[in-house]
Amino acid sequence: MNRRLPVADGAAVRRRAVELVREHRGAIAAVTIIQLLAALASVGIPRVLGSMVDLVTGAVDANTAGRLQGLIVVVIALAVGNAALTGCGEYLARVLGERVFAELRERLVGSAMHLPLSVVESAGTGDLLGRTGRDLDSIRNVVQRGVSQILVIVLTLLTIVAAAVITSPQLSPALIIPLSTILPAASWYLRYAVPAYRAMNAMWAEVDGVVAETADQAVTVDAHGLGARRNRILDRAMIEVWSTEQYALWLRIVLITALGLGSFAPVIAVVAWGLGWPDTVPYPSGRSPRCRCTPFSCARPSRR
């Protein structure tokens, strides 16, 4: 009977992650700075567009056209800068992912070569293939895409929160509303998703082992008429993988639904406030409430 290789606990994973960050702190810092600049550029575009709307709807004088052209140039520059910074950050993140992937694979192969032969044989072909193939591919995907996306999301959220607080401190507490649904959903998801993904990787390792062993010993399988038996083993393993994949997919659907509802909660709260009590909405100083999303705006002129 195969005995699987041990899986690192949470403390070991965090310790190794900190070591990786220290080893590649220069590349990670470069990616972080570039993504922060891209997030600032993306947040600045709506602010400049709002200034353009205020300029057009306000009092027109001889300098209005010149200021409007200047704002248009600023919007174009921010859009081009955002695209360039995002592409550069994505490129650096992919390079970092390939570098980390190569280092981890070399270390894994070196560690496997120093294991006792009895441990390697008892682990089975599938477990070794899963560790050197699927697990490392997942890590590479996390470094290439996950780290970049996490940085973009975190930095964008921070800039949006800061912009919202600066623009309207009275309405900014609405940004806290999503925490009521996102935090419980994330806690629930992590509690069930981590064991599910571990089980899924173990089952995929079993599938890889069955396929590799059958292909490697194809002559023996044909000579002893073991084809039907090997197919039944593979079918059973695939059924287990399919069931676990469906369970993990259901967990992701619940999480994404909660995140979607939470992301729209601030907008719904502010719009409901404007619908119910339009005269009490604290508009920022110097801003026109012409973009107020109320059914009364079509029948009633906006305040200045």
Image (spheres, rainbow, N blue to C red):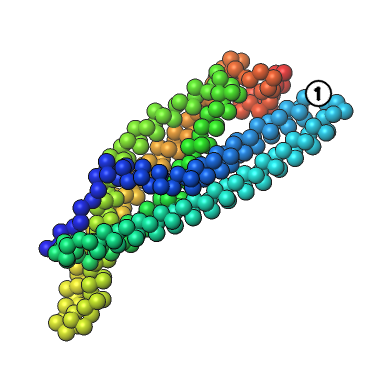
Residue 267 at x, y percent in the picture: 53, 30
Instruction: Find numbered disc 1 in the image and state the secondary structure of the residue it sits on.
Output: loop
Residue 270, by quadrant, is top right
Q: Nearer the viewer, residue 162 or 254?
A: 162
Residue 237 in the image: above or below residue 178? below
Three-letter code for the amino acid on which mark 1 is drawn: Ala
- What residue sits 27% from the left and 49% below the top? 196
**Residue named by callout 1:** 59
Residue 214 at x, y percent in the picture: 23, 74
Looking at the image, residue 130 sits to the left or right of residue 166; the answer is left
Q: Residue furthest top?
A: 280
- Which class describes the residues within 10 Å of circle 1: few (<14), some (14-19), or many (20+)? few
Q: Which residue lies furthest to the bottom in this view?
A: 223
Q: Is residue 212 visible?
A: yes
Residue 294 at x, y percent in the picture: 61, 26
- How many labels were placed on the picture? 1
Q: Is residue 136 visible?
A: no
Residue 70, by quadrant, is top right
- What residue sits 41% from the left and 40% below the top? 257
Looking at the image, residue 180 sits to the left or right of residue 81; the answer is left
From the image, which quarter does the C terminus lie in?
A: top right
Residue 207, by quadrant, is bottom left
Q: Which of 270 and 18 is in front in this view?
A: 18
Residue 160 in the image: above or below residue 132? above
From the image, which quarter does the N terminus lie in?
A: bottom left
Looking at the image, residue 42 sits to the left or right of residue 194; the answer is right
- What residue sits 63% from the left and 26% below the top? 292
Residue 118 in the image: above or below residue 20? below
- What residue sits 59% from the left and 18% below the top? 281
